[in-house]
Image (cartoon, rainbow, N blue to C red):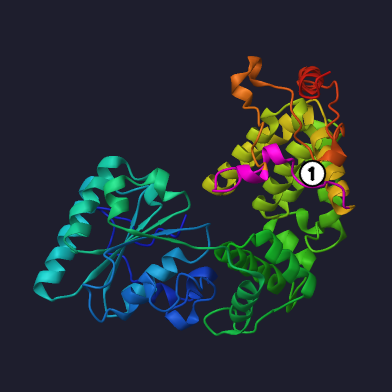
Amino acid sequence: MEEDLFSVSHDAPAPRTLSDRNHDHRAPLAVRMRPRRLEEIVGQHAALEPGSPLRRLVAADDSRTAPSSVILWGPPGTGKTTLAYVVAQSGDREFVEVSAVLAGVKDIRDVVDQARSRLRTIGKETVLFVDEVHRFSKSQQDALLPSVENRWVTLIAATTENPHFSVISPLLSRSIVLTLESLDRADLDTLIDRALTEDRGLGGAVTLADDAREALLRLGGGDARKILTSLEAAAAAALMKESKEIDAATLAQAVNRAALRYDRAGDQHYDVTSAFIKSMRGSDADAALHYLARMIEAGEDPRFIARRVVIAASEEVGMADPTALQVAVAAMQAVQLLGMPEGRIPLAQAVVHIATAPKSNASYRALDAAIADVRAGRGQGVPAHLRDAHYSGAKSLGHGVEYRYAHDFPHGVVAQQYPPDDLVGTDYYEPTGHGQEAQTARRVEALRRILRGG
């Protein structure tokens, strides 16, 4: 969750501005390093391209052409709060943050009333930033509608969950949804270098060894805030040991993570991934879960893991249990929807399903055999009766003539040639007797007898 800097509280003192926090040496490193201008933001090129909704909000030449509500959807640490703050800084707008975890309907109405009063008396606009908007109830989201409809505030809402499922339709229809991506390696390197060298950061007090940098990037998993928080802890640990260099051991000690041994760009990455796949193939659910845990703890991209699971569902299980692919695809979609750490739960379910399911790679082998024949030049022209007959003159060429419509025959199957002449009688698919494929094998045998007139 983004830092709760402006949560509404009736008995709390008035909060300081984000600008105050950025310049406070007691503030966390991630807060001190938060970009203050659009030019300082790294990544999110699509969201910040010329003419984009955020660019129009920052320009603020004519508020009538700028969106009154923007929903930022993306993983943690991708700069949702930062983007909202930069928008607020442009045009000297007031910035108010409300946490969906703590604020109620009355709190929202109080903020909106203050924003209306501010706009009416001194002409100052308000940017209302709602963190984790997906946690708002329907009534809380309903309370935002008048302020968006009447432009009493510029609403910027942030969510790590798909807003099309978690935000009510009336608010969604009045908003522009912008998808933020995890920062790439170059972006994160830039942030780390700034934090190490700039005065508002660590001011050159420590350096970062190459192995520690790799581990820091891996453990951060694309989350800039998490990376800066870990860097700050490691810097403190190094200085306590009177060392000016953060090495991998110091970082591991500071963040209490033993997974640093997993080298996502080296042999460990490939070895662990290979063992993960082979454990599912070998029906060892316990080993597969171990390697899954190692990848998760090392900060491996959960989308990479999910893709491997989907591949395994077809390659290793296939028609022996066709539901394995459904479970794997559902797990991949759930990871996209939930993010981490919750995404680990459907991943675990899919891994156990695949590991414990009966195994068959028959459909996979069948396609490879067919591809080999195609590459070898086998497969003559399409039989005339199967060719497209939906144009003038097609029948004069024999196209579609004597085609037999399968639904006109018992069981929807009729003797008829489907493959090219030189592939008649070729069997690519050789089903196993494992799991549900045993039933498929009997059906395939019966179908081939009918199709070939046997």
Q: Label 1: few (<14), some or many (≥20) within 10 Å?
A: some
- At a point 75% along the width and 29% down the height, the residue shown is 319
Q: Is residue 389 magenta?
A: yes
Position of 422 with respect to 61 (left or right) is right
Label 1, on which residue?
Answer: 291
Position of 175 with respect to 21 (left or right) is left
Q: Quadrant of the C terminus?
A: top right
Q: Residue furthest right?
A: 376
Question: Overall secondary structure of the magenta stretch?
Answer: loop
Please say if 37 is above or below 80.
below
Given residues 307 and 197, the one toward you in this image is: 307
Given residues 451 and 192, the one toward you in this image is: 451
Q: Specify the amino acid type for callout 1.
A: Tyr
Q: Is residue 386 magenta?
A: yes
Please say if 411 is above or below 166.
above
SS at mark 1 in the image: helix
Quadrant of the rendered image containing residue 189:
bottom right
Quadrant of the rendered image containing residue 48:
bottom left
What residue range appears in magenta?
A: 377-397
Is there any visible trace of residue 343 in the rendered image? no
Quadrant of the rendered image containing residue 147:
bottom left
Tell me where residue 125 appears, x and y as whole percent. 21, 72
Position of 430 with respect to 338 (left or right) is right
Q: Residue furthest front?
A: 396
Tell me where residue 323 appears, x and y as whole percent. 67, 28
Please say if 340 is above or below 353.
below
